[in-house]
């Protein structure tokens, strides 16, 4: 579904998508409940990391 959604023919191309960025690692390590805090641009929160 990902390839078709961006206009590639899935019969010709293969791929996979996953997300394990630094935000997700920090969530697991520091037991943060909301990933959206990282994109809220609140420096009081972001300076902790």
Image (cartoon, rainbow, N blue to C red):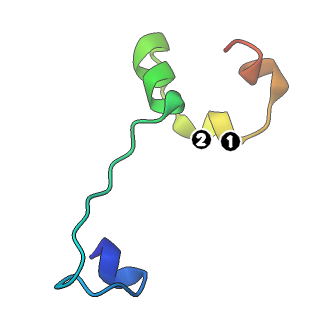
Q: Where is residue 44 in the image (x, y as percent from the top left)?
A: 81, 19
Bin the neighbour count of mark 2 within 10 Å (Cα to Cα): few under 14, some 14-19, many 20 and up.
Answer: few
- Could you tell me which secondary element the residue under label 1 belongs to? helix
- Residue with the mark numbered 2: 36
Residue ranking furthest to the right? 43
Q: Which of 20 and 35 is in front in this view?
A: 20
Towards the viewer: 10 or 34: 10
Image point (33%, 72%), residue name: 2
Please tell me whether residue 29 is drawn above or below residue 27 in the rendered image. Answer: above
Instruction: Point out the residue furthest to the left here.
Output: 11
Residue at 45 percent of width and 30 percent of height:
24
Question: Foreground: 10 or 25?
Answer: 10
Q: Can you tell which mark lies on residue 49? A: none
Q: Residue 4, position in %: x, y? A: 32, 83
Horizontal side of 29 relative to 13 (left or right) equals right
- The reply to whether callout 2 and callout 1 are in contact (CB within 8 Å) is yes
Element type at marker 2?
Answer: helix
**Picture quadrant of residue 9:** bottom left
Q: Mark 1 packing: few (<14 Cα in 10 Å), some, or many (20+)?
A: few
**Quick one: quadrant of the C terminus?**
top right
Residue at 80 percent of width and 31 percent of height: 42
Tally of marks: 2
Q: Is residue 22 above or below residue 29?
A: below
Name the residue that disc number 1 marks. Answer: 39
The residue located at (52%, 33%) in the rendering is 34
Horizontally, residue 22 falls left or right of residue 17, namely right
Image quarter hosting the N terminus: bottom left
Question: Residue 10: x and y, percent?
Answer: 22, 82
Residue 14 is situated, as x and y percent measured from the top left of the image, at: 21, 69
Distance CA(mark 2)–CA(mark 1): 5 Å
């Amino acid at each position: 579904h990902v390839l078709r959604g961006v206009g590639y023919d899935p019969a010709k191309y293969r791929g996979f998508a996953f997300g394990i960025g630094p935000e997700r690692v920090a969530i697991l390590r520091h037991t943060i409940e909301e990933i959206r805090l990282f994109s809220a641009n609140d420096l009081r929160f972001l300076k902790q990391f």
